[in-house]
Image: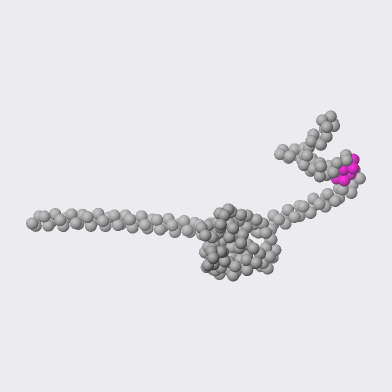
Amino acid sequence: SRDRLLGWAAGIGLLLLAATAALLVQARRLDQSRLRQREAEAGLRATLEGSLDSVAIMRAVRGPDGSLQDLLIVDANARAAEYIGRGEGDVIGKRLCELAPSIRSKGYLRHYEKVIATRRPSSAEVQATDPHLAGRWLHHQVVAVGDGIALISRDVSERRLAAQALAEQRNFLQSLLDYLPLPVYAKSARAETLGRYLFWNRAAERSFHMRAEQVVGKTVSELFAAEVAAR
């Protein structure tokens, strides 16, 4: 009957309306999800580019036997490109060992393969040999990411040079004081090492009949009897 047909039409219309509303809600959620993803990607990119560290994400390139043959750079910030010696647009999508052959020749690729296999991060400080880095010291941190790695590097040349200069100054001071005819020694005033000997010259070795290796790092109570230490 006509009323039944009208009822069916109204029901179908309501179903279509509900389905359309559901699709609109789903589309809005999808748009919001995509927006959040874009915002997250933009935030990640801003973080990478603003970092003082070199950051490169690489995927393993494997041979027929499954061994690591190279690493494909899938993302990298501008500082990573600088360390490789190329422009930022010239590294993404390229193979690491083709851009930096020393990665293979110096055994770093085998080390990266071990990190991927064991899932254990590693870190080390190495002196760069590539001409464009001019012997700078770099701290490398390698972290497994899927079937690949994230390589995070930082230039620590200033700290290494400062430590080297400090060591040279200490050696010079040691040499200078060793020539003095009188015993010279120094103790720490820091809370965590209070009273421990920091320096002991040759004249002190002769006077107290103890070598610097026996004294430095210890307190007077660890070296002398109680009645002597109390003086």
Q: Residue at x 86, y 48 (%)?
A: 177
Left or right of residue 33: residue 144: right
Q: Residue at x 77, y 52 (%)?
A: 167
Q: Quadrant of residue 141?
A: bottom right
Q: Report the span colored magenta.
A: 201-207
Tell me, yes or no, if residue 215 can be seen here: yes
Q: Where, quadrant-wise, is the N terminus in this rendering?
A: bottom left
> Is 32 within the magenta?
no
State whether residue 176 is above or below residue 91: above
Q: Residue at x 65, y 59 (%)?
A: 138
Tell me, yes or no, if residue 91 can be seen here: no
Q: Main secondary structure of the magenta part?
A: helix
State whether residue 197 is above or below residue 82: above
Query: Residue 57, percent across and down?
Result: 54, 61
Tell which residue pokes out farthest to the front in this image: 65
Picture colour scheme: one colour
Query: Residue 126, percent across and down?
Result: 67, 59
In this view, the residue in front, 163 or 72, is 72
Query: Residue 122, percent across and down?
Result: 61, 54
